[in-house]
Amino acid sequence: MRKSLFRILSVGPIPNHIAFILDGNRRYAKKRNLNEGMGYRAGFLSLMTLCKYCCELGVKYVTIYAFSIDNFKRKPHEVDAVMDLMLEKIQGMLKEESIVSQYGVRVYFIGNLELLNEHVRQAAVKAMEATSNNDKIVLLICVAYTSTDEIVHAARESCEAKRARVRSSGAREGNEEELKVVDIERHMYMGVAPDPDILVRTSGETRLSNFLLWQTSNCVLYSPRALWPEIGLRHLVWAVLNYQRVFPLLERRRKQM
Amino acid sequence: MALNCSNNSRFLSGFGVRVFPQPGKLEFDFARLIMFLRWLEATILDFGDEMHKVYMWIWSSGDLGLRLLWHILHLILSTWYFIIGLMGSVESFLISSGLFKRYRDLDISKVQYLAVAIDSDEALQTLKVLELLRWLEAIGLRKVCLYDTAGVLKKSKEALTLLLKNERMSSETASDPLVEEKCLSLEVISFSDGKQAVAKAADVLLKKHYLSSNTEKPKLTESDMTDALGAIGYREPDPDLMLIYGPARCHMGFPAWRIRYTEILHMGPLKSMKIGALIKAIHRYTMVHQNYGT
């Protein structure tokens, strides 16, 4: 049934890259009288389901906003719970029989990984190495990420690269060229993937909360009211149909930019 | 006795009251009900079979069949939006006629800075943009930022400001001291004030922290970037709310640095803009609660 639906959708343009803001896990736990940890676990199950659907549909890149730098402001026990869950799931990814191996998922961890604790950071690096040969679909997990931090990081790297060029060339001619947009974009964390085509934020909130602000110039925003653990096939199908509806306009705008 | 009972039944049934159905008659009705249900079931199953046959025919017709189904899906979507549009028009009309109390008592002070992003093709309708600005002024907004990708609004900025000023002058006496307070302060930006501005600010930081100092790894922070953007002329605050007028729900390249926590609402095409929808959007913003990550 799902495969038939995806076959029909494939008549029109399929988005290459979909981004998700996983909002509403805590509200879901409250609604169902569970503890918060269970809310995050339910959220993880939704994530796996949605990745599977995206893979079947033919989406090549999926980005998720797992943990923002702003989220470090939460109570320590909450932050620890999320970090522990993340460590557990990353270690799960490294196993042979995991979903990432089964579906050929290449994983990237995007963000200021220096802000994470040692165990999580090492596990993340290991997972990136272990999945580097997978080529079916790319999953970009944004942890310790904000868009403004990404921009500042990119600016810092561009400045350092420029200074190195000026010093190595010795003369003053390096100073004649100003830093350009391409220099900044070259050093963005999200440079490993094209710009997203659709950005889905669950629980009905309509703000981007410092996520992919630079990359969403031409991206369709979609805010279903469902909480993240409640997201399902119908939301994905609705998002893709809306994307297909405005695709000619987006293509025209992309060429103009 | 039996005669009396049957006389009573006839008397009461004359008033349309079904009384004590005869024993044999009950069984007969039950049997008819069962037959009717069976007929209904058979009809539904036949219908299901027919639909399945049509579906398999479409499927086996290959690409053509798939294309037909795809178009049907999109037709359903368009019909849905048409119905939503109609309901929206009715609601806007009711809101603008002051029917709902909550929209009459709008707390406009919550919207410190409003951004309006307009599709560049639609921004060419200067009179429509002027009408929108008039509405925003009437609702009570004082600081508005207009954005379009191609810079069309930058070209019409002077005309818009002049027309707004003229209207204000003609409607109020010149000696009214409150005229200046009621002015709508307008900022107009385009795509080049986004990514290119950040690149220019990075250049400022390069010259300040990297090329002229000997510090090996200067620690650039977000406030350094904000200061650099201010140094090249970008000092306006971040918008609280952004309204998008255009065919797609997309911020069209609005300066990334400024929309961290901005609520983004899609209002539809500019030509079908309604004041009721505008009031509803602003009211919806005033009800939102932000955690800022905590």
Image (cartoon, coloured by chain):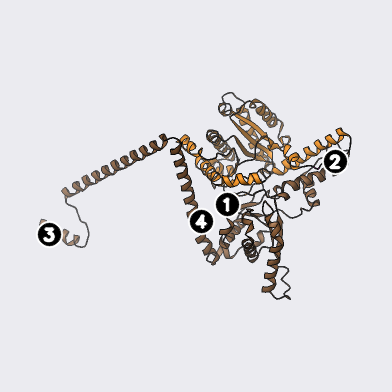
Chain colours: A orange, B brown
Chain designation of label 1: B
Disc 1: which residue? B247
Mark 4 and mark 3 lie on one chain; the one further toward the N terminus is 3
Question: Picture coordinates of residue B101 (x, y %)?
Answer: 55, 65
Q: Dot 3: what SS?
A: helix
Pointer 3 with pointer 2, Cβ within 8 A: no
Q: Nearer the viewer, residue B193 or B40?
A: B193
Q: Which residues are magenta?
A: A175-179
Q: Nearer the viewer, mark 3 or mark 2?
A: 2
Residue linked to disc 4: B85
Q: Earlier in the sequence, mark 4 or mark 1?
A: 4
- Compared across the picture, whether B204 is left or right of B135 comes to right
* Main secondary-structure element of the magenta-colored stretch: loop
Q: Amino acid at mark 3?
A: Asn
Task: Determine the secondary structure under disc 2.
Answer: helix
Vertical side of B187 occupied by A225: above or below: above
The amino acid on which the numbered mark 1 sits, given as a three-letter code, is Pro
Comparing marks 1 and 3, which lies closer to the viewer?
1
Judging depth in this view, the residue of B288 and B64 nearest the camera is B64
| Circles 1, 3 touching at the beta carbon (< 8 Å) | no
Residue marked by disc 2: A175
